[in-house]
Amino acid sequence: MTGRSSYAVPVPKGYRLGPWEVREPLGSGAFATVYAARLAEEHDPEPPRRAALKFLPTGTRTPRQLRHLRELAEREVELLARLRAPRLIRMYDTLTVDDPDHPELDGATVIVLERAEGSLDAVLDHDPKPESGPALLAQICEGLHQLHHAGWVHGDLKPANVLLMKDGSVRLADFNMAAELQGTHAYAPAFATPDYTPPELLWPEIDERGTRVRPTADIWAFGVLAHVVLTGSFPLPGGSTEARTDAATRYARGTEELRLSPGLPEAWREIVRDCLAPTHPERVARVPDAGALLRRVEEAAGASPSARLPRLRPRRWRRPVLIAALVTVAMLGGTAVTYALRDEPPAATAAPAGCQKPVVYEDEKYGRGYTAGQSDSWDFTIKQGDGGSQVREAQCLLRYLHGIAEVGETDSDFGPLTHAAVVTFQKRAGLDADGVVEARTWSALRKAGEV
């Protein structure tokens, strides 16, 4: 074991699963952990000798959490099992852990994935405007075209979900939010990453099938991504996700202008502007489909359809991140937001960096209460030493809704400051002051029954 307790699915180093031997952890969040793996025995030429194993604890959660986890896993598995394209990450196998001697692992779903060298997120962390940006974008757009041509919408295109292989080529990954088109629409879970979400989906209508999305949602996300890669900045004003989300809403209403960076190359300016048309009808009029967009992007990038990037050297990165993008944001948390929201909270100070402004959410089991980005944690227990999106949710509610600034940074890390802030809140609320956030503390944090 690594000695850390914050992994969503702790797996001992050397653990055997089928032909695979688990090695070091590559990334973790509230609901999944990805490990490096190697073949422990002679095997056919496919798959290769190394892979990434994504462990989802689909046998060890509450019924409500299990439904969510299984839906996310099923979406990714279904897409990867049906599609094989050069610019999509490859799935080799799916496994289920059968190990009663390890109850924390028993029943877990494991997705065996192609191993990447890093993510675009890590590249941008090292170099906000990489020289290879245009070639990167050409391959990303090619992957988007392959996905749309097969009848799917990605639903969560962003730098963390763009993986870079050993030879420098690009793969799109993380298809937990992907949805197959049913006519002109698809139905996806009510989650997305706000900075890459088009205005029409910031407050969508949701029914029993989820949120209705169209391919133009991915076109918008590509426009934001292109602006970020080529200029190192977002195309809408604001120093926080909340501010940029508000700007996107105003932009769609015609009261805010798109403010493209002066550093955006002229060849890309019209492309980005068209991708970021404020409404779906305007967007589809300017960018009919991903194939048409790809032709324009390849021309702007000066790239052939099969252009490759210079070979990456992860050892030179300040923060090497191997395969971290394989863990979904809804699982890693921090930037995901639930959109089944209503009403505004009472007047309060500005939300801390990294937090969504609390709004009222109606939970079918627990009733109404405030959420700051994660509405599915009413019965999820967190304590000191834990990490993930539920921790950030508690930190944001403590600071923004209850005015306890001593919680520290909203960094998804349940450290001593957060523990002390929880104890302070529990004493104030007349709860057992044990520093553990469980159902009763969540209810008080969300002001359930008061809204």
Image: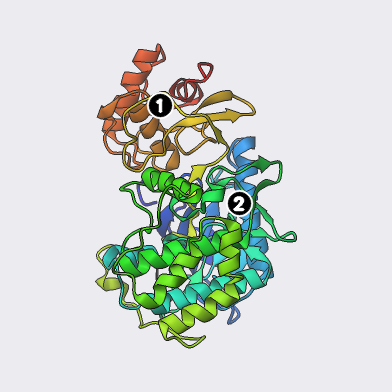
Tell me how the rendering is colored. Answer: rainbow
Q: Which one is in front in this view, the residue at disc 1 or the one at disc 2? A: 2
Residues at marks 1 and 2, CA–CA distance in whole angstroms: 27 Å
Q: Residue at x 60, y 46 (%)?
A: 69
Query: In the rendering, which numbered label is found on residue 436?
Result: 1
Callout count? 2
Q: Amino acid at mark 1?
A: Val
Tell which of 165 and 258 is nearer to you: 258
Residue 111, quarter of the rendered image: bottom right
Residue at the spot of label 2: 72
User: Few, some or many C-alpha atoms within 10 Å of disc 1 (few <14, some 14-19, many ≥20)?
Assistant: some
Left or right: where 424 falls relative to 171 = left
**Is residue 411 placed above or below 274 in the rendered structure?**
above
Residue 264, quarter of the rendered image: bottom left
Indicate the position of residue 323 as horizontal and vertical percent values: 43, 64
Left or right: where 142 falls relative to 14 = right
Tell which of 105 and 72 is nearer to you: 72
Label 2 element class:
helix
Query: In the rendering, which numbered label is found on residue 347?
Result: none
Tell which of 246 and 368 is nearer to you: 246
Q: Residue at x 45, y 37 (%)?
A: 390
First in residue order: circle 1 vs circle 2: 2
Q: Amino acid at mark 2?
A: Leu
**Is residue 261 placed above or below 63 in the rendered structure?**
below
Indicate the position of residue 172 as horizontal and vertical percent values: 51, 68
Q: Residue at x 32, y 39 (%)?
A: 410
Identity of the residue furthest to the front in this view: 254
